[in-house]
Image (spheres, helix red, strand yellow):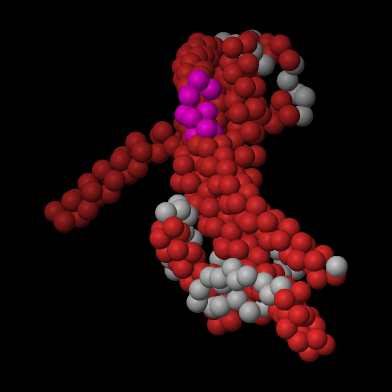
Amino acid sequence: MEAWNKFTQTVSQGAAQLTQNAAPVGERLTRNLGTLSQQAKERFGAVDAQDITELPQEYKDLEHRVDALRNAHQNIIRVTKVYETEGYDYPVQVQESFNEVTKSLGHTVTSWAATATKQAKVMGVSVQPTSAPAQTHKTLAHAFSRAAASGALELGAEPAGIVGVSSPISPNSAAAAGGAEGTRKTSVAAVGAQESRLGQALQKLALAQDQVGNARLKQDEEIITGFYHPWTSFGNQINLAMKARQAVREARLHLDSWKQTLKAAEVSGSSSKLDQYRAEVEGAEDKLVAATEEAIGLMKNVLENPEPIRILSELAKAQSDYHRAAAQILDSVQSDISRSAISMESDYRAGRA
């Protein structure tokens, strides 16, 4: 009997605890049902406009500004996310196979760059070296570099060094050396000189494009770390403001649902629960005021935060540094190739004279 009494006492205590815990759940369920009912009535036009609580104009103005900020934030996120993918500018029509041949071309360019750096140091010239490891990067500039390196090798460039600028064989001196045979040798020598110069030009272009590609990879890394990640984190603050706005919306719907309930009770003449309904309306008004004040504060914090402008400057700086470096590299190689073209054109005309 004593065991049975303990059992019934335990069950009674558990039932009481369950009832106590279920009370808030029931209240929340009732509140949610009222909010959903009010939302549905408004959506289908079953509520007069004057029965919808008007929010402060300051709040509505801030809503429009935050919406504009959120749209701008999301649009920029979608665009700058591309910097996480190395091959975003890689041409789809390029049919490179990433095998030993392609890797060897990368190694060749790296070897050329190392040799060029050593030669520049001996001559006292500052040269920006390419990346030390030979990697097969999938960028437009690196693809261009490999294509130029392949052409340079086919035209006689040395795989492990810079082709020296040799003095071309003079057509006139070669012809004077041996009549018709000298003329034939002159022709062969001239073709060889042309191939050598073209190979040298392609070699220089391969080195320049490799440097441009490495500069682009550096830009991408700086954009991801200095802009994309901070910009994404700033989105968390926008989301907090959006959640606060949702809380305001739910509080307003909750208030208007109780207003409708109170209005219906007053129209029907039922006075048994009027005081309770008025108390619910007053409580809902207080919650709406508190939620609106919190949302206004969060929206102002987001709109007045200087961090987005600062990290935008990081994006512009990374792009500016890259384009400046690329312009300097390409200007230098263009000048070298242009001088070679002028020299070759002069020799070509002299040979036809």
Q: In percent of the image, x 59 and y 18: which residue is there?
A: 62
Q: In percent of the image, x 62 and y 22: which residue is there?
A: 65
The reply, left or right, for residue 209 in relation to residue 282 is right
Name the foreground residue: 46 vs 310: 310
- Residue 36 point in image, percent of width and height: 62, 32
Looking at this rendering, what residue extends furthest in the right direction? 353
- Residue 82 point in image, percent of width and height: 61, 52
Where 295 sits versus 150, above or below? above
User: Would you say residue 181 sits in the magenta stretch?
Assistant: no
Name the foreground residue: 39 vs 293: 293
Q: Give the quadrant of residue 261.
A: top right
Decide if residue 41 is in sight here: yes
- Residue 44 point in image, percent of width and height: 77, 29
| Magenta residues, dominant SS class | helix
- Residue 29 point in image, percent of width and height: 51, 35
Quadrant of the frame with the N terminus: bottom left
Q: In percent of the image, x 73 and y 15: which residue is there?
A: 49
Looking at this rendering, what residue extends furthest in the left direction? 2
Q: In the rendered picture of this protein, how many numbered marks are placed on residues?
A: 0
Decide if residue 341 is in sight here: no
Where 154 sits versus 272, above or below? below
The reply, left or right, for residue 111 in relation to residue 199 is left
Looking at this rendering, what residue extends furthest in the bottom direction? 181
Name the foreground residue: 302 vs 198: 198
Q: In percent of the image, x 22 and y 53: which residue is there?
A: 7
Where 316 sits versus 244, above or below? below
Name the foreground residue: 151 vs 16: 151
The reply, left or right, for residue 114 in relation to residue 251 is left
Quadrant of the frame with the C terminus: bottom right
| Extent of the magenta region | 303-313
The reply, left or right, for residue 340 in relation to residue 62 is right
